Image (tube, coloured by chain):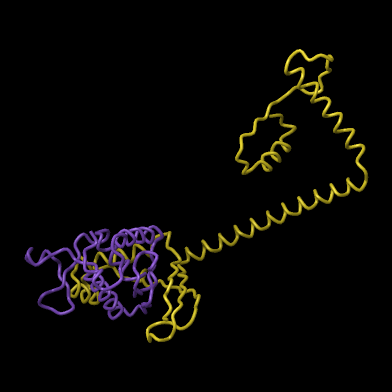
Amino acid sequence: MSYLELAVHHGSGQVNTKLPVPDPNRKLCWVDPSNLPAAAVSRPTVAAILRLLQNFFVALEDSFDFGLQFVHHLDLTQLGALTPQRGVTLLISRDTVNMIGRQLAAFTQKRPIRKAGDLTRPVR
Amino acid sequence: MDAIYTDYWERLQRLLHGHTHRINIQHVPAHVATRGAYVDVDDWAAGWNDRVDHEAVTAHQLRDHELESLRRQMLQVYHDQCALLRRLVLFHLDLAASHFVAITENVVEKEDTVTGTDPGGLDGHRLALHHDPWQRGLPDASPLDSRVVQMADKFGWLFTQNMFAWLKGQASDEAVVAYRLPIRCHT
């Protein structure tokens, strides 16, 4: 499963209603947005969620040593992402896979992902 | 429908399977002694039905040996084809059943097609089965587990808790997919 698909799915609020935001005081750490002033919190972009998820799975592997299989060059061109994507091998239910596919297709419908700048917008 | 002709009707239905045009089937009285002059439609239909039956019997009696053997051969081919199709259907169902068992045993099918320029990638074309149960080994997001605390310190307690629950929930779902990963080759 690509990080991009996970990012769009999590950015849609299906799993976490409020995603953590980068901690202004600690590098590569995130905090609950309710702990920050409202003015400092904005809707997370897909790029920000991607960064969060990538670090989450790397930290998960570092902490638990599950032997996660990270994958590269995933082809999501059929879903509107024209650049190769990175991801991680996950067990995902069939319903969730279908839902994620629809969410990513909807996200890229008006603006396909061709470069990094195409990720600098929120999912919804 | 007469019970004694059930096999004929079933055969007819099989032959007409997929036929898109409307077919009208009308029952008519059979083997009624005609009175020479047809007074109504039923009388007319019964008379001609009787005539057709007699003509068919006559034609059957006049068939030569060569034609009869050809008919038997054609029938044999038909029955052989039916038997073959039935065996193929059973084979297909066996495959589907074994595939379903493989999925429920949590086997992830993964197809990687990456050339070796990336040190983190996989070489060549692969079709491999990976038993990948790590998600089910995730602990409950307990504050007593130092590893969970470490994760929560970095990503926030609520997010860590939700992610653990989501990952475990996905792995425990009965409808876990064999997720095929299309991977782009380097050019």
| Chain A, chosen colour in render | purple
B13 relative to B182, above or below:
above
Residue B101 x, y percent position in the rendering: 52, 63
Tell me the quarter of the image containing the C terminus of chain A.
bottom left
Seen from the viewer's position, the closer of residues B173 and A46 is A46
Horizontally, residue B43 falls left or right of residue A44, namely right
Q: Nearer the viewer, residue B111 or B144?
A: B111
Q: What residue is rendered at 42% in x and 81% in y?
A: B187
Residue B8, placed above or below residue B78: above
Give the letter of the yellow chain: B
Give residue B17's position: percent from left, percent from top.
64, 43
**Left or right for B134, reference B130:** left
User: Residue A77 in the image: x percent, y percent?
Assistant: 38, 68
Considering the image in quadrants, where does the N terminus of chain A appear? bottom left
Q: Residue drawn 15% across and 80% down?
A: A27
Q: Is residue B65 above or below residue A35?
A: above
